[in-house]
Amino acid sequence: MSSTYKKGYTDKKTIEYIKNNYDQVSLRVPKGDREKYKRLAEVQGKSLNQMIIELLDAENERVLKEEQAKRVLTYAERINEKVATLSVNKEHYSIFQIGNTRIKFYSSPFLTKYCEILKWDDTGYIECTCLNTNSDGLVEDSIDLAFIADRLHLPLDIFKGIEEVRIV
């Protein structure tokens, strides 16, 4: 039994798949730099294409984090002194902000997101729900900001007059 090979059959399928699932970006570099970049990628065990994509993804992630931080700061500056904000970042820090006062404190490495403020009192105590990577559903948590503020030598009266804490 002889097998026949139809030239281009696999190539057509591959070309169609690439066409439907990828965009092409052309890149121009100074003469000779292509080989330098190719060697750099090979040393890291990657293709030049893979290395470029990873670098672009990392830069995109950095810019998105920077934009989010600016939005949080702008939002906190816009609201009046009676509303505070609470947020968490990917470096395992939580940020409580009222006006220009910002309290940054270490959070659990499992904390991914604050969801709802259950209780706030103007002594600096927060009860909230949050999502953790090590649990299936919402988890209740509490934060004693007075304890943190005291360690930072902040006056405890900064919490007086705060009527609401919002999650951003």
Image (spheres, rainbow, N blue to C red):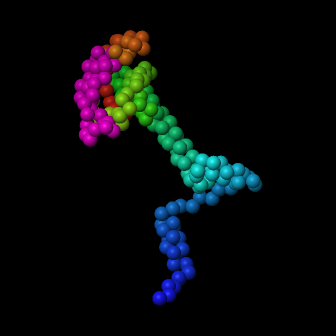
Looking at the image, is 8 positioned above or below residue 50? below
Comparing 105 with 121, the one in front is 105
Residue shown at 28% from the left, 20% from the top: 125
Q: Is residue 75 visible?
A: no
Place of residue 100 in the rendered image (x, y in percent of width and height, measured from the top left): 44, 21
Residue closest to the far front:
1
Place of residue 11 in the rendered image (x, y in percent of width and height, measured from the top left): 54, 74
Q: Is residue 7 left or right of residue 37?
A: left
Majority secondary structure of magenta residues: strand
Looking at the image, is 161 positioned above or below residue 69? above
Residue shown at 70% from the left, 50% from the top: 36
Residue 145 in the magenta stretch? The answer is yes
Q: Is residue 63 left or right of residue 99?
A: right
- Find residue 137 and report its image quarter: top left
Comparing 163 with 168, the one in front is 168
Residue shown at 40% from the left, 23% from the top: 105
Place of residue 37 in the rendered image (x, y in percent of width and height, measured from the top left): 67, 50
Q: Which residues are magenta?
A: 118-146
Looking at the image, is 122 positioned above or below residue 141? above
Q: Is residue 19 visible?
A: yes
Quadrant, the C terminus: top left
Residue closest to the far bottom:
1
Q: Give the total number of marks visible in the rendering.
A: 0
Residue closest to the far right:
31
Residue 14 in the magenta stretch? The answer is no
Residue shown at 45% from the left, 37% from the top: 68
Place of residue 123 in the rendered image (x, y in percent of width and height, measured from the top left): 29, 15
Looking at the image, is 50 positioned above or below residue 110? below
